[in-house]
Amino acid sequence: MKDCDVIQPELSAYLDGELTPPQRELVEAHLASCPQCQQALAELKALTAGTAALPKLEPAAEFLAEVRRKISRGDDPEALTWFDYLFRPYLLKIPMEAAALIAIALLVIQFRQPPPDETAASDQVAQEENSATEQSPPVVAKAEPVRSAPSESASVPQLLQPAPAPENEMAAAPAVESTPSPEAQVATETATGSPVDNAPESVSGNGQSAGAQAKPATTTGGRNINIKFTSGTKRKVPTSTAGTNGPAITPTLSDAEVSTLARDAGIEPSKVGGVVVVQSRNLQEAEGRTEELAARYNGKIISVSPSMGSTGQVLFVEVPRDDAAAFKLGLQQEPGSSALFTNATMAGVTAINTNGALLSATSTARVAGVLTSGVGAKSASVEAKSAVGTNGVFNGSPQLSLTNNPQAQAAATTVLEILVVPPPSLAPTNPPPITPPATW
Amino acid sequence: MERVIQADAKKTASDQELLGRCRVGDEAAFDELVRRHQQRAFNVAFQVLRDREDAAEVAQDAFVRIYRSVNDFRGECEFTTWLHQIVVNLARNKHRWWKRRGRQSSVSLDAPVEMADGEAPMQMAASGDAPDVETVKAEFVERLSRKIEELPRKFREVLVLRNVEGLSYEQIAIVLDCSLGTVKSRIARAREELRERMQDEP
């Protein structure tokens, strides 16, 4: 029986005389003693003969004439080429292939721009975590030495959503540089005092925001400042929270509060090009340091909110756009040169998000608009100036004129929101090792 | 002068000889080749396509192709193998483009049934010398024809090349441009498939 499984597949070739002599002998030896395989062979023979006996069709009488006609007509039937395989029959394949291409393109687009739902979802998570954060023990904003923040828990930068420039401003500026400048989005670790040792990412370009969001393990908390931009994009201000082993807490202001503060200071919330979170117990020193740094970059503090007590304080700083990143770094990095961290030997990771698109929308874009359209451009420029006036952002900025020289763009300024918040009150007894800030 | 004598012997000229004359522009030699092999080409095409019109077109195209490329054929194989190759390839193209399923399957039973000489084909249908043996044969072949039509095209190809055209495995391998092992296993599978279908229902 077992032989039958081996022999039967060979019967076909045996019947056709296509087996080697040894194979043939094997089959014949088995056949001699196996009625079952004899039967199988008989059936095969009948089928083969029957196939051979299939009716032979006579070609039409005009077969040769038809061949001749095709030859004289110049026909040249060819085997299929790769082109035929790809596209024939046209009516069937081409629409299908087009549809497939479109589907692929849509998928690619989908992946490159995470759907808004995802963003909203992660926002919500951040909100929830933040609400938990806010229940932590209140911290007094007093100038006193602080123990360093817990390392593991200490905050990890979370990248912020880029906030496109308001549409209504864009309208006046046809050519808009919409790409955030690479240095605009910075997430940094405060190296002051006793920094943390787990700063996985210190810089993120725009394209990495999705990636940063996709790391919930490292971004343990965040706050959502819902400054409503015209375009509707949210801006998140992540802060440090306790991870698994620490209460690093950064109570911050609510979105509404920040919006109100900005408006009170004459700054359109949408003009705020970035948020810097600074942990400090001493507001005066933080302010002094900010002012000093701003002055170094030809910027200045344009508004200081009233003290918000334990929830922190907001400063609005105007700095040249190109120096914004450096300013932020300076604010976070230079411990010795400022009073900011001299007394408060705390550490924490903060996140900075300067929105490059916004920056360029308020500066470069206007200049471009001037160049590209005549009357409209002028009005755009006027609008820009008036906006500058009310905001105090571009005050005394002579470069914002009907020119498009590079200096004009370089001198454009941006407004940063400096959030001074109390550092966590609880800290581990052993300060974590100091790690150098990651590169930008 | 010898040429003239050869031309007189046209009737018995081999395919290779006819081909050689085709190469030097002898149109009559080509016509003779067509007449000699048109039925073969037509039937192979028909068994693969199971459609008279398509089969006629494919068979004609095959000869047009031969006419165009007669100078490329160097006689590596027999002319019939070359013809089979072209017919099968053109039939495949046709089949691929216009896959017609369930198209008329009646293989004109009025056509004369030519049995392959020698073999006693109808062992399965009726052994012995029943008076209605011809009827049984016809029924059997007709049923077989329907079942063959249900087979996948690649099975029909090997069955027609092997059983109808009587090509060797090696020739089939050339025609189908595949290995001997593939030919062997495909023929075996085709027959097994056909046997199972014949056992199903009429």
Image: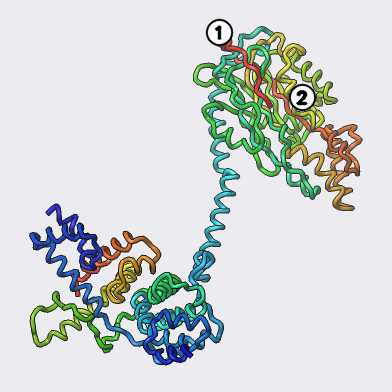
Q: Nearer the viewer, residue A131 or A54?
A: A54
Q: Viewed as shown, does residue B88 lie left or right of A353? A: left
Q: Residue at x 36, y 84 (%)?
A: B39
Snapshot colouring: rainbow
Classify B169 as above or below A326: below
Q: Nearer the viewer, residue B107 or A153?
A: B107
Q: Give the letter of the chain under mark 2.
A: A
- Image quadrant assignment for residue A7: bottom left
Q: Amino acid at mark 1?
A: Asn
Q: What is the distance, in whole Å, between disc 2 and disc 1 at their CAs?
A: 31 Å
- Residue that numbered label 2 is attached to: A327
Classify B184 as above or below A218: below
- Image quadrant assignment for residue A146: top right
Q: Give the letter of the chain under mark 1.
A: A
**Same chain assignment for discs 2 and 1:** yes
Helix, strand or loop at mark 1? loop
What is the tally of numbered marks visible in this picture?
2
First in sequence: mark 2 or mark 1? 2
Q: Quadrant of the C terminus of chain B?
A: bottom left
Neighbourhood count class around disc 2 (C-alpha, 10 Å): few under 14, some 14–19, many 20 upward:
many
Q: Amino acid at mark 2?
A: Phe
Q: Nearer the viewer, residue B199 or A405?
A: B199
Neighbourhood count class around disc 1 (C-alpha, 10 Å): few under 14, some 14–19, many 20 upward:
few
Q: Are marks 2 and 1 in contact (CB under 8 Å)?
A: no
- Residue that numbered label 1 is attached to: A430
Q: Viewed as shown, does residue A277 lie left or right of A136? A: right
Q: Viewed as shown, does residue A315 lie left or right of B161? A: right
Residue A41 % position (x, y) = 16, 66
Residue A419 % position (x, y) = 70, 24
Q: Is residue A225 visible?
A: no
